Amino acid sequence: MYARLPVHAPPAAVLAALRDVLRERRITEYAVVDHGHDMAAAGQPASRPGR
């Protein structure tokens, strides 16, 4: 159902591009969850699929 695509850009640039598209399509971003921050606070290392 989903495909993983490699992205050769910094995370901040990818997030900005995603938000631009959401805005263009008038899709509301209701919440942002920083899972990496939450995991670090819980003492768990962040994992990265495919690495």
Image (tube, rainbow, N blue to C red):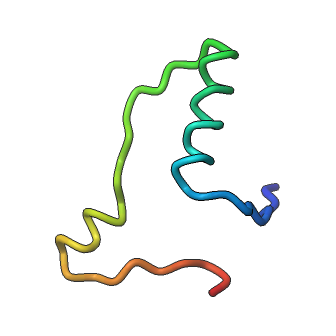
Q: Residue at x 80, y 62 (%)?
A: 5
Residue 37 sits in which quadrant? bottom left
Q: Nearer the viewer, residue 1 or 47?
A: 47
Residue 48 x/y as whole percent: 54, 78
Seen at 62% across and 25% down, the residue is 22
Q: In the displayed structure, does residue 16 sit left or right of residue 29?
A: right
> Which is more toward the observer, 23 or 9?
9
Residue located at (63% from left, 37% from top): 18
Q: Residue furthest bottom?
A: 51
Q: Position of residue 35 (x, y in %)?
A: 36, 60
The answer to which quarter of the image holds residue 15 is top right
* Residue for point 47% across, 26% down: 29
Q: Is residue 40 left or right of residue 30?
A: left
Name, please, the residue furthest toward the top. 26
Quadrant into which the C terminus falls: bottom right
Residue 39 position within the rendered picture, expressed as x and y whole percent measured from the top left: 28, 71
Residue 41 image position (x, y, % from top left): 17, 70
- The quadrant the N terminus occupies is bottom right
Looking at the image, residue 10 lies above or below residue 29: below
Task: Count every numbered label the image shows and give the total.
Answer: 0
Looking at the picture, does residue 6 appear above or below residue 28?
Answer: below
Residue 50 position (above or below residue 22): below
Q: Is residue 37 left or right of residue 20?
A: left
